[in-house]
């Protein structure tokens, strides 16, 4: 029997996608998925360092593994992702049970490297070099994958179209941990999308640090992002297409128009604002102002009136005043984002903002974050309540985490990505509902999700 592995994933959807692929690649090599860290011969930490807190979680997890592995010399760990790229050899020195560190360009070689260190008990390896071209991976999509909290459902998948970023925003460590932008060859993207559709995928999300700049480097073979969108959308059998993440400075008019031109391009866009203050945006190096951002929003709403917008917000950026923060709240009220990821600014090593003054105190930043999140909760609640009575097509993932007596609840998403839970009497549950679509009438709005009832047959 093969060795047992367990993967812990921190951070973004790209890390989730990387972990899913690594799981499949190990399973194809006759490794077995463990039920947890206690049961594993190998624990892989796929890490994030975009903020200080996720990095601290990695060190906490490694400390816990050190205790767990103390009496199990055959067990070992691997650390991948952004913290591995950032700290590299330090992790091998500080944690002797870590036998492999692999950076964001090294994951393609990670399955073979894990096999090697498993065979050679005293070997430690590093895969930390940045590559000039997008590193293609072996096809590992035929078998099952390990479960991750943010993994897509059975008919959904992520497809990487690029790696790295060339923007060097003042607060962001991504260009240092994921390298410069490398677009994936469009034929490789389309080939993977075709394979996914052939295995039953109906909803594809194209992934990259800044998908709007796809093709601005040689890897895209002269194809821009809008052209790639049209090519993927035209694939037979693809019912839903999404993409993330977008930098506002790079979104082209033809990408905006695509929301009105492509029926299967979902009416949802995550468009990071970061701040509603032009002064803060300049210090961040974002290369747009609020007028430009609002112009993009108007164009998107004209192209697709039902579009739903999400965003990222940083509060407490160095030099942010009370007036700057109030301007951010006003932008939230104006755009009415249906969802947002919001964080307190934290210094990351090597970025320009480390040296910016004055710093905003943690207490002040915390108070601002609480106010912003309270406003977001109000806007989200109003948006969800407005959906009551609407007829939506829901793509089901599986049974809901929360159930109630007398019914079995299934969880899915509408085209805009909202979570919809649908209760069924036990005798009414269609067979094999996971991965199927169904018309659903929205009956109730909860805090972060919707409740609906069956309004037609699944397909």
Image (cartoon, rainbow, N blue to C red):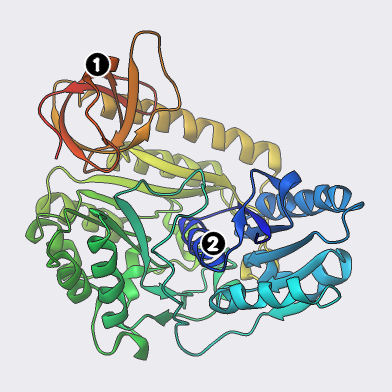
- Relative side of 128 to 222, left or right: right
- Relative side of 216 to 297, left or right: right
Question: Which of marks 1 and 2 precedes in the sequence?
Answer: 2
Which image quarter holds the C terminus? Answer: top left
Viewer-closest of 2 and 293: 2
- Relative side of 79 to 410, left or right: right
- Relative side of 7 to 42, left or right: left
Viewer-closest of 336 and 48: 48
Residue 117 visible to the viewer = yes
Give the labeled residue for mark 2. Answer: 27
Residue 35: x and y in percent read 64, 43
Report the residue at 15% width, 57% height from top: 259
Classify 10 Å Cα crowding around label 2: few (below 14), some (14-19), many (20 and above).
Answer: many
Mark 2–mark 1 Cα distance, whole angstroms, equals: 36 Å
Report the residue at 54% width, 87% height from top: 131
Q: Is residue 127 above or below residue 343?
A: below
Q: Is residue 180 above or below residue 347?
A: below
Give the labeled residue for mark 1. Answer: 427
Residue 398: x and y in percent read 36, 35
Q: How many labels does the image show?
A: 2
Q: What element carries label 1?
A: helix
Residue 88 visible to the viewer = no
Residue 393: x and y in percent read 16, 37
Report the residue at 31% width, 70% height from top: 212
């Amino acid at each position: 029997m093969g060795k047992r592995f367990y993967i812990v994933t921190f951070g973004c959807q790209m890390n989730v996608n990387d972990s899913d692929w690594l799981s499949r690649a190990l399973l194809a090599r006759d490794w077995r998925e463990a039920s947890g860290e206690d049961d594993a011969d190998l624990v892989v930490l796929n890490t994030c360092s975009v903020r200080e807190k996720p990095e601290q979680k990695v060190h906490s997890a490694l400390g816990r593994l050190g205790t767990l592995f103390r009496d199990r010399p055959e067990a070992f760990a691997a650390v991948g992702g952004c913290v591995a790229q950032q700290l590299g050899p330090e992790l091998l020195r500080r944690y002797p049970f870590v036998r492999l560190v692999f950076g964001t360009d090294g994951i393609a070689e990670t399955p073979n490297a894990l096999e090697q260190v498993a065979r050679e008990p005293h070997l430690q390896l590093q895969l930390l070099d940045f590559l000039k071209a997008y590193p293609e991976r072996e096809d590992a999509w035929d078998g099952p994958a390990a479960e991750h909290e943010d993994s897509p459902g059975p008919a959904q998948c992520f497809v990487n179209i690029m790696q790295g970023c060339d923007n060097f925003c003042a607060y962001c460590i991504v260009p240092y941990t994921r390298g410069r932008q490398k677009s994936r060859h469009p034929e490789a993207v389309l080939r993977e999308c075709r394979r996914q559709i052939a295995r039953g995928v109906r909803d594809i999300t194209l992934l990259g640090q800044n998908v709007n700049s796809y093709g601005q480097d040689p890897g895209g073979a002269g194809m821009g992002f809008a052209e790639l969108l049209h090519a993927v959308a035209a694939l037979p059998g693809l019912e839903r297409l999404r993409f993330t993440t977008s930098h506002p400075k790079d979104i082209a008019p033809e990408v905006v128009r695509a929301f009105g031109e492509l029926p299967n391009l979902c009416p949802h866009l995550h468009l990071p604002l970061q701040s509603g203050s032009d002064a803060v945006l300049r210090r961040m190096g974002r290369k747009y102002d609020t007028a430009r951002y609002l112009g993009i929003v108007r164009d998107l709403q004209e192209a697709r009136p039902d579009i739903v917008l999400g965003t990222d917000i940083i509060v407490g950026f160095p030099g942010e005043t009370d007036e700057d923060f109030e301007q951010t709240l006003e932008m939230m009220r104006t755009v009415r984002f249906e969802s947002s990821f919001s964080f307190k600014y934290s210094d990351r090593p090597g970025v320009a903002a480390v040296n910016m003054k004055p710093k905003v105190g943690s207490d002040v930043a915390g108070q601002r974050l609480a106010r912003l999140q309270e406003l977001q909760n109000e806007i989200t609640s109003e948006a969800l309540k407005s959906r009551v009575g609407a007829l939506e097509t829901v793509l089901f993932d599986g049974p809901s985490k929360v159930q109630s007596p007398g019914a079995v609840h299934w969880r899915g998403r509408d085209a805009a990505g909202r979570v919809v839970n649908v209760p069924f009497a036990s005798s009414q549950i269609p067979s094999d509902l996971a991965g199927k679509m169904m018309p659903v009438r929205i009956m109730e709005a909860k805090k972060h999700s919707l409740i609906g009832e069956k309004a037609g047959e699944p397909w």
